[in-house]
Image: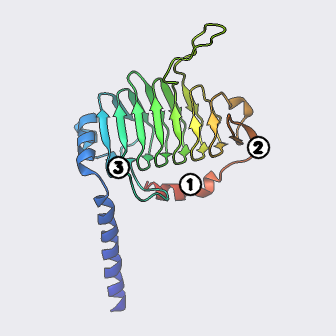
Amino acid sequence: MINIFKKIYTGLRSVYHKLKFYLTINWAKTIYFNLKKFPFSIAKKMPVFFYGKVKFHDLKGEIIIDSPIKTGMIGFGQTFELFKKEQGIAEFNLSGKVLFKGNAHFGKDCLVYIGPNSYCEIGEMFALGSRGKLITYEKIIFGKYVRVGYETQLIDTNFHTILDLETGKVASLTSPIQIGDYNWIGNRSTIMQKTVTPSFCIIASNSLINKDYSLLGENILIGGIPAKLIKKNISRDWEGERELLKIWMKV
């Protein structure tokens, strides 16, 4: 008899947690986005979930998923870190083109801006922490397993023209950003235009990244303002955390 009650309790608990999870989804925005941006054969699988409040500013751009389609494989506003509450300031603007190569999740209150004629490629198992900003006016490419800490911003433009008063030269307003595979970017960092990082790179918290670091080799730690090499032969334990990361992202 006790075993029967345990099975009933376990079943009810499972139903409760599933119901609790599905109640966090913003179904109006989720259904609208999927039907608007995908052919029905894909939209009916609901590959993109929006959680909580989010403001759509422009959805004229293109979204492509270059991976087997799974329900909820791309999440915007999902809880997968310490932040549980939202401020309701999340914004999503898709005027250019974004390509997802697998599962990707954005934390709470993120700003994602894919500008007109710009391109953003997001690798498998990408995550941008809560209150992060992803702003592209030209091109930003992420390799696979890129983990970006909360309140970090990635911006490929200066926004305003900068003039060298001695030479009269005008600095490029935009330049691409390329983040290598298995990069771990610490919280509150700023990744600016011209940034190139190698695979297996750790970026310390509160760093300014603004140049090509690929010649430093893999398995490095960089950091500072602006960032410089801090340590070689160092890496996050990606293999040890692989299954845990999948659980956090509900893969």
Instruction: Mark yes or no: residue 66 visible.
Output: no
For the residue pair 92 and 214, the one nearer the viewer reads as: 92
Q: Disc 1 designates what residue? A: 242
Relative to 21, 135 lies left or right? right
The numbered dot on residue 88 is 3
Residue 222: % across, % down? 70, 40
Relative to 184, 68 lies left or right? left
Element carrying mark 2: strand
Q: Residue at x 52, y 19 (%)?
A: 173
Q: Residues within 10 Å of mark 3 (few under 14, many from 20)?
A: some
Q: Report the quarter where the C terminus lies.
A: bottom left
Q: Residue at x 45, y 38 (%)?
A: 101
Q: Residue at x 64, y 40 (%)?
A: 207
State how the image is colored: rainbow
Q: Disc 2 designates what residue? A: 231
Element carrying mark 1: helix
In the image, what residue type sits under mark 3? Gly
For the residue pair 9 and 105, the one nearer the viewer reads as: 105
Marks 3, 1: nearer the viewer: 3
Q: Residues within 10 Å of mark 2 (few under 14, many from 20)?
A: few
Is disc 1 in contact with disc 2, using a CB cutoff of under 8 Å?
Answer: no
Q: Residue at x 36, y 87 (%)?
A: 3
